Image (cartoon, rainbow, N blue to C red):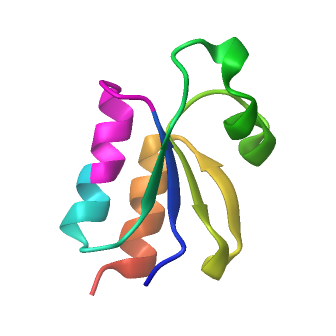
Amino acid sequence: MSDIELYVLPGCPYCAKVTSKLDELGLDYEAHEVPRSHDQREEVEAVSGQTGVPVLVDPENDIEGMPESDDIVEYLESTYAA
């Protein structure tokens, strides 16, 4: 089982891009839905230093709060693709 966590906002196309890649690679992950208002996103800000989503956490590989969907997808491909 993986310790991967993903901070997402429902309806966010960037988040959907990352969840699609996680599903494509068959990776288990825990999704955390963040509030719509950036002012209420304390949890994701504590993890990544910013309030945007998606944000990936992968403690097994020392990833503590990676933002930006393109960077996350590239990381997942290079780390988990067969």
Choose between 9 and 69: the one closer to the eye.
Answer: 9
Choose between 45 and 72: the one closer to the eye.
Answer: 45
Depicted 66 relative to depicted 27: above or below: above
Q: Residue at x 71, y 38 (%)?
A: 43
Residue 45 pos. (x, y %)? 75, 35
Q: Residue 38 appears in which quarter of the rendering? A: top right
Depicted 63 relative to depicted 26: above or below: above
- Horizontal arrangement in the rendering, residue 20 relative to residue 28 (left or right): left
Q: Residue 12 appears in which quarter of the rendering? A: top left
- Horizontal arrangement in the rendering, residue 37 relative to residue 44 (left or right): left
Q: Residue at x 47, y 54 (%)?
A: 72
- Horizontal arrangement in the rendering, residue 59 relative to residue 1 (left or right): right
Quadrant position of the N terminus in the picture: bottom left
Residue 37 pos. (x, y %)? 59, 12
Choose between 55 and 73: the one closer to the eye.
Answer: 55
Depicted 26 relative to depicted 7: above or below: below
Q: Main secondary structure of the magenta part?
A: helix
Q: Residue at x 30, y 24 (%)?
A: 11
Quadrant position of the C terminus in the picture: bottom left
Asked if the stretch drawn in magenta spans residue 15, the answer is: yes
Asked if the stretch drawn in magenta spans residue 27, the answer is: no
Magenta-tinted stretch: 9-19
Residue 66 pos. (x, y %)? 62, 52
Q: Residue 29 appears in which quarter of the rendering? A: bottom left
Depicted 12 relative to depicted 68: above or below: above
Q: Residue at x 29, y 39 (%)?
A: 16
